[in-house]
Image (tube, rainbow, N blue to C red):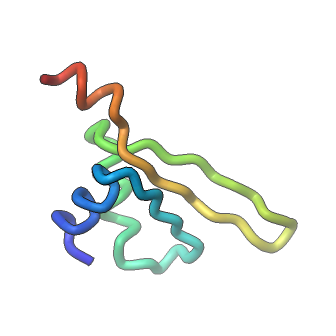
Amino acid sequence: MTRAEIEFRLQSGKTLCVDRRDCPELPVLLAMEREGLVKSRLVEVDEQCSVLKFWWNTTVVDEQR
């Protein structure tokens, strides 16, 4: 998925979940988080499973307009 596709999906209200460190979208999402465009939260399902959830940061984007 390209950065433009990720931005479009997150802006439309979807949440993107990453469960693998080698996910090709992870560096893009982390860069977007550093830029303040997205927020993330680590969700631990159990002792062996965790997911990093990303969603669009509407607060910061609205303030920039």
> Residue 3: x and y, percent?
21, 65
Q: Residue at x 53, y 74 (%)?
A: 21
* Residue at 33% across, 33% down: 58
Can you give x and y, in whole percent of width and height, for residue 26 in the image? Answer: 40, 67
Q: Residue at x 85, y 66 (%)?
A: 46
- The single residue placed furthest to the right in the displayed view is 47
Quadrant hosting residue 63: top left
Q: Quadrant of residue 27?
A: bottom left
Q: Quadrant of residue 29?
A: bottom left
Front-most of residues 15 and 29:
15
In the rendered view, does 46 fall on the left or right side of 56?
Answer: right
Q: Taking 16 as reference, is 39 above or below it?
A: above
Left or right position of 30 against 61: right
Q: Quadrant of the N terminus?
A: bottom left
The quadrant of the picture occupied by the C terminus is: top left
In front: 59, or 42? Answer: 59
Report the number of numbered marks: 0
**Residue at far top of view:** 63
- Residue at coordinates 54% horizontally, 56% vertically from top-left? 53
The extreme left residue here reads 65
Q: Position of residue 62 (x, y in %)?
A: 24, 25
Using residue 14 as the reference point, say whether residue 9 is left or right of it: left
Image height of 5 relative to 38, above or below: below
